[in-house]
Image (tube, rainbow, N blue to C red):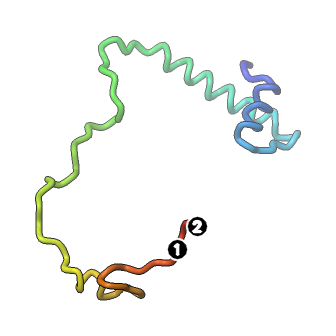
Amino acid sequence: MKVTKEDLENVAVLSRLRIPEDQQQKYMQQMDSILTYMDNLSEVDTTEVKPTTYALPMQNVFREDVVRPSLDREAALQNAPLRDNGYFKVPKVLEG
């Protein structure tokens, strides 16, 4: 087994978890099987595989940046709970 009790305690501290004494062996075995699986993956030949950021092909989903007429001031302020001189009025958030 690759995972020691010290490894489990270290992961628990980093994860801010408390693992009961009676379940520590179970979690050590689970962590060990995960690491064994990762070792199997490292044996796969990936020399012809291009590095990618995403598993699926990505494309830009944003619309074109085109100037369009915007909402007029009165329509924008129509449902504002507070307004002042054509602007939204909001409570002060920052002090000083």
Q: Is residue 11 left or right of residue 85?
A: right
Q: Which residue is mark 1?
A: 92
Instruction: Confirm or deny contact between disc 2 and disc 1 (CB under 8 A).
Output: yes
Say if 9 sits above or below 70 in the image. above
Residue 56 horizontal/vertical position (percent): 30, 37
The amino acid type found where label 2 is placed reads Glu
The amino acid type found where label 1 is placed reads Lys
Secondary structure under tag 2 reads loop
Crowdedness of circle 2 by 10 Å Cα count: few (<14), some, many (20+)? few
Residue 34 horizontal/vertical position (percent): 61, 29
**Of the pair 94 and 34, the residue shown nearer to us:** 94
Residue at figure coordinates x 23%, y 86% from the top left: 74
Residue 84 horizontal/vertical position (percent): 36, 85
Q: Which label sits on residue 95?
A: 2
Q: Quadrant of the C terminus?
A: bottom right
Q: Is residue 73 left or right of residue 95?
A: left
Instruction: Locate residue 49: give its quadrant.
Output: top left
Q: Is residue 52 left or right of residue 18?
A: left
